[in-house]
Image (spheres, rainbow, N blue to C red):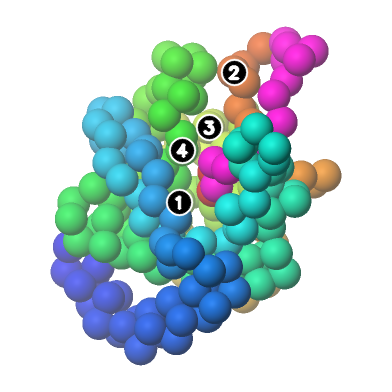
Amino acid sequence: MGASVFGLILLLPLFLPLAIAVKAHFGGGVFFRHWRPGYRGRLFQLWKFKTMRDDRDESGRLLLDADRLTSFGRWLRRTSLDELPELWNVLKGDMSIVGPRPLVVQYLARYTPEQARRHDVMPGITGWAQVHGRNALTWEEKFRYDVWYVDHWSFVLDVEILGLTMMRVLSGEGISQPGQATMEEFMGTGPVPEARREHRGKENS
């Protein structure tokens, strides 16, 4: 909690110009809000700066991420500035600074029992999987890192992750999965169904 308050105060000068820039670029609302499962699967509303347009097809469905993600949105993701509003989630007690990233609700039913253990700790703004490849990892690799963190958590490890996170942000590595605008949808571990759905509007990472 103290770290999130300090972070909010330290980064407050960035919030207003970023909010104005997001508003000017995308129009409409400034924030992306989405329900995510947190500790023990408890749902909370995640806050981020928008990185995509709200363009929809004739039937009203959001277009694919690749069609809605702009160069400005990619820059926000590369610098991780889109994550700044999550400090509010930390302040509210929904998240920690470090922990497995909170993913979308529909994934809960697709986890193996081992993968579901990622919810045995608070979700975080950054985590062990993020500093080992972020969205460039496969889902299975990402979940293995998450569970490893659950089993090996310590204050020293969190400090190490924060230091590695700064290096990752500066390098801009791992922002998207190869061949994807963001991250391919997780359909569960095992054979992938032939009719895999295209990823729309989840902002997974």
Measured in 3D between alpha carbons, the distance from the residue under mark 4 to the one under mark 2, in whole angstroms, is 13 Å
- Compared to residue 82, the image places residue 130 above or below, namely above
Secondary structure found at label 3? helix
The residue depicted at 44 percent of the width and 55 percent of the height is 32
Instruction: Find disc 3 in the rendering and name its residue.
Output: 143
Measured in 3D between alpha carbons, the distance from the residue under mark 1 to the one under mark 3, in whole angstroms, is 11 Å
Let me know if residue 95 appears in the view: yes
N-term-proximal mark, 1 vs 2: 1
Q: Amino acid at mark 3?
A: Phe
Classed neighbour count for the residue bearing mark 2: other residues with Cα under 10 Å, few (<14), some (14–19), many (≥20): some
Q: Amino acid at mark 1?
A: Gly
Measured in 3D between alpha carbons, the distance from the residue under mark 4 to the one under mark 1, in whole angstroms, is 13 Å
Instruction: Find disc 2 in the rendering and name its residue.
Output: 188
Secondary structure found at label 1? loop
Instruction: Find disc 1 in the rendering and name its residue.
Output: 127
N-term-proximal mark, 1 vs 3: 1
Measured in 3D between alpha carbons, the distance from the residue under mark 2 to the one under mark 3, in whole angstroms, is 11 Å
> In the rendered image, which quarter contains the N terminus?
bottom left
The residue depicted at 45 percent of the width and 51 percent of the height is 127
- Residue 163 is tagged as none
Residue 178 magenta-highlighted: no
- Residue 103 is tagged as 4
Secondary structure found at label 2? loop
The residue depicted at 17 percent of the width and 69 percent of the height is 2
Residue range in magenta is 191-203
Given residues 178 and 167, the one toward you in this image is 178
Q: Position of residue 35 (x, y in %)?
A: 36, 39
Q: Amino acid at mark 4?
A: Leu
Q: Amino acid at mark 2?
A: Gly
Is 13 on the left-hand or right-hand side of 42? Answer: right
